[in-house]
Image (cartoon, grey):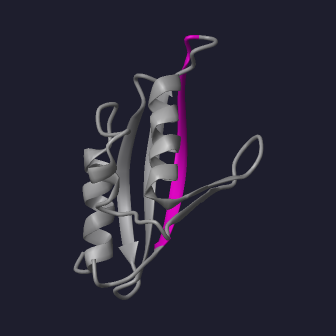
């Protein structure tokens, strides 16, 4: 990985946890006021805007799933301003107590001047 975007994606995933989920300084590694996070998954798509909106989403995840573990598997970059990150999401269902796991892919575009 050579682009600043790819390095920041790695730093964000490696540092996100229950304590940093509500940290603006951690999220500002990767996100700014112009950032938009769009999720298309099971129930309905949703969107969070700006670093503070994304903090709210991540804080909600760790509130709902205190044992949430995100593991970054791959980062593939295309030039200085595009990359894809594949990750595992594992946790325990608060309703059933059963372990759950999902795979996700995050596509990022951004400025090469981080």
The foreground one among 25 and 39 is 25
Magenta-tinted stretch: 97-108
The residue sitting at the right extreme is 44
Q: Quadrant of the C terminus?
A: bottom left
The foreground one among 77 and 20 is 20
Q: Residue 107: percent from the left, percent from the top?
A: 51, 68
Q: Residue 100: percent from the left, percent from the top?
A: 55, 27
Q: Residue 113: percent from the left, percent from the top?
A: 28, 84
- What residue is at 34 percent from the left and 86 percent from the top? 80
- What residue is at 41 percent from the left and 84 percent from the top? 78
6, above or below 112, in the image: above
- What residue is at 42 percent from the left and 78 percent from the top? 110
- What residue is at 22 percent from the left and 80 percent from the top? 2
37, above or below 110, in the image: above
63, above or below 28, in the image: above
Magenta-colored stretch includes residue 99: yes
Magenta segment, principal secondary structure?
strand
Q: Quadrant of the N terminus?
A: bottom left
Horizontal side of 106 relative to 38 (left or right) equals left
Magenta-colored stretch includes residue 106: yes
Horizontal side of 19 relative to 109 (left or right) equals left
């Amino acid at each position: 990985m050579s682009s600043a975007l790819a390095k920041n994606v790695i730093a964000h995933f490696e540092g996100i946890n229950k304590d940093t989920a509500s940290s603006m300084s951690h999220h500002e590694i990767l996100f700014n006021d112009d950032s938009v996070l769009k999720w298309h998954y099971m129930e309905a798509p949703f969107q969070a805007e700006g670093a503070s909106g994304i903090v709210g989403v991540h804080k909600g995840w760790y509130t709902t799933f205190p044992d949430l573990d995100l593991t970054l598997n791959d980062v593939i970059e295309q030039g200085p301003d595009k990359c894809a990150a594949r990750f595992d999401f594992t946790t325990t269902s608060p309703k059933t107590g059963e372990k759950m796991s999902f795979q996700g892919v995050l596509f990022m575009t951004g400025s090469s001047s981080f």
